[in-house]
Amino acid sequence: MANPGEIRTIFEMLQANYHYAMRNMTPKEISNLQILWVELLRDIDTDILKAAALQHASESNWFPSVAELRNAAAEIVTPNRTTPVEQWGEVVRQFKHPGHCSIPYFCDEITAAVVADMGWLNLCMSEDATADRARFIQGYTDRQKRDRRLAVQLPQVADAIARLVDKRRMQLRSGEK
């Protein structure tokens, strides 16, 4: 995880590249922006954050927002290695080897999860490959989106959600609505 000094160094690197972006800002406003960056980017590994900043600088003419850096970092840690259609092809290949009597192995963890959700034996014995393919692609796409959303989610937001879920469970256990 990046410490405040490392985040400030990345900020200053980008500030040098986008020197025109802050010409109308006061030193206090720039300082406040750095404080915001530290708060909202500290959960990202330093090397990943730096790579995200460099990637942004190579692609954009504008100083990055926190959201742009978080998205660039998420792209680095959760790249779309293959498409859902390519992964469906891997599932189809597994029908032949190891087949329905064995447990398949998928290198792609999303593929493995979607196949587990759909049921390997159900897939092997199905007579509607078109519907299975569509359900697989939808499940794969949904999981990719969820993984991406979780990758950019701030830890503070994840903590708040966990607290709300725990509170709701306690209410349900005690019979409250």
Image (tube, grey):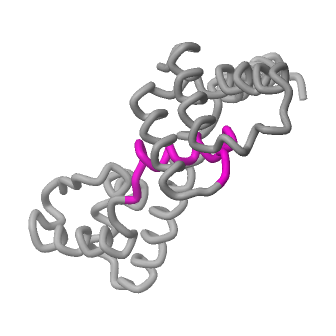
- Position of residue 89 relative to residue 6, above or below, is below
- Position of residue 74 relative to residue 95, above or below, is above
Residue 92: x and y in percent read 23, 75
- Position of residue 109 relative to residue 11, above or below, is below
Q: Quadrant of the C terminus?
A: top right
Q: Main secondary structure of the magenta part?
A: helix
- Name the residue located 59 percent from the left edge and 21 percent from the top edge: 8
Toward the left, the furthest residue is 97
| Residue 114 occupies quadrant | bottom left
- Name the residue located 68 percent from the left edge and 20 percent from the top edge: 39
Of residues 120 and 143, the one drawn nearer to the viewer in this rendering: 143
- Name the residue located 57 percent from the left edge and 47 percent from the top edge: 71
**Does the segment drawn in magenta span residue 77?**
yes
- Name the residue located 70 percent from the left edge and 23 percent from the top edge: 34
Does residue 132 appear left or right of residue 59 in this picture?
Answer: left
| Residue 98 occupies quadrant | bottom left
The magenta region covers: 62-80
